Image: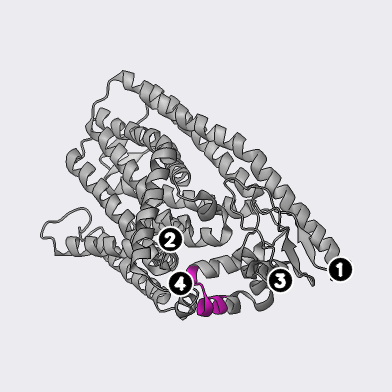
Amino acid sequence: MLKIISKINLTKDDKVMNLILLAINILCISLFLMLGYFNRFSSDDFAYYFRVRDMGIWHAFIFAYKTWNTRWASILFMNVMMKIFNPESSLLLYYIFILGLFFISVYRLLRSLFSYNFMEISPLITANYSMLLISCFFLCTFGIDESWFWMNASTIYILPVIFLFLGTSFILDIKNNFFTHLMLNISFFIAGGGNEPLAILTIIMFGTTFITESTSKRITIFNHPSRKHLHKLKAALTVLILSFMVNAFCPGIAVRKGFLPPANANHIIASILYTGFLLCKSFFVYKLIFIIPFTLLWMYIGNQFYIQKYRMILRLKFILTITLVNLLVISFFVITICCMVLHGMAPMRAMTVISFFMTGTFAYIGFCLGCKTNFPKASRIVYYFSALIIAVSIAVIFFLQYPIAKTHADSYDQRILALKTLESNHNLETQTLKSLPQAGWLYTADISPDTNNIQNKYFREALGLHFNVELEKNKLP
């Protein structure tokens, strides 16, 4: 039986820092759930809703799989959600579920990772840093409105990330029982059935690790026969490939390609370059304000290992070089494959996988820097200042977004109530609707002035309206 050989304890000052981190996490949870409370259906959400209502979960899944959406795991999950929620619902409970599942996944991963490296960390520290990682990923997501607060897209781009964390935690778990293998298989089956670039990258990384470790003549803690990590990695890789193949051979791919413009090499190259420019602009203008202080906070916990004489075999120059180069390669790969598949510009929600790897990269860099660097006590001021920057930023965002989100939700609710009232009174005349106000970090794709627009049809069918609806032509947002 392998033993824990290092336990990281908290000093009095560390407990103060832990309380500060807890306050940051509470602020971010409050921001996330506030937005979730004011979030409503949008765009394709209405289509999934009325199909599940009319056809049932399974038949609606088959219809989508054959005609449009290739992400089978995401469709199934979305269809289940459509049995719980409706166009009149606040989506708060959905976001409580997503955040709770995300926290459990990251907490399990960090705990398994620490145990894997023979370290014992306080549950409170692990919980705080689990939520800190989620907060960083959330705030550093490119296209937060699309990726997180469009329900349809969140099942494609956020759910696979959650199950990737969960599945990896079971690979690193020192337990090797039936439950561990069951959850591992379920997690990677779902992770491979959503975001295709994430699935491809995970297959490449897991495949490379498996080949390297299985052919290595040196016994490591990963390929040690008693730990069974290599066996679990092989199972995860197999399930990922199978799940991805279900996506790759989806009949809906051919149908969807029929709606794309003809492939043009010059246009695709221009789209790749412009998407890269937009991401760089977003990173340096909007994301660095979170990336830098988050990295410093991860340095803080890494420094606790240095202070308590826990030495990790790390080559800082090599780590910095390889992680940053890997991030650039991954980013270029994701941008390229998305632009090639779509024959043009990729939406920001498709860049969520870059945000995921970016968050992990800077968290790892910060941790490694802290493990190898002896900071004077005065550096604690830097940590406190970093925490203050994050806390103030989140608080400002909360107070800026609250009135915008509330106004949008109120207008949406009033629109739905008015239309349902007209339907109950057997109205048959076309209704012209005012545009919904700006939604801020919430996603919104309003209907069209054209009554024959597909989004108008989805909206009408979802509400069960027997009359047409259109948007005011002279007041488009």
Q: Which residue is mark 4?
A: 261
> Magenta span covers which residues?
61-73
Question: Where is mark 3, residue-wise?
Answer: 461
> Tag on residue 345?
2
Say which of 375 and 270 sits in front.
270
Cβ–Cβ below 8 Å for labels 1 and 4? no
Q: Residues under labels 2 and 4: Cα distance?
A: 11 Å
Q: Is residue 149 left or right of residue 334?
A: right
Is 16 within the magenta?
Answer: no
Amino acid identity at mark 3 = Glu
Q: In the image, which is nearer the foreground, mark 2 or mark 3?
A: 2
Left or right for 51, reference 282:
right
Q: Which residue is mark 1?
A: 427
Mark 4 or mark 3: whose residue is earlier in sequence: 4
Q: Amino acid at mark 1?
A: Asn
Q: Quadrant of residue 225?
A: bottom left
Of labels 1 and 3, the one closer to you = 1
Q: Secondary structure at mark 1?
A: loop
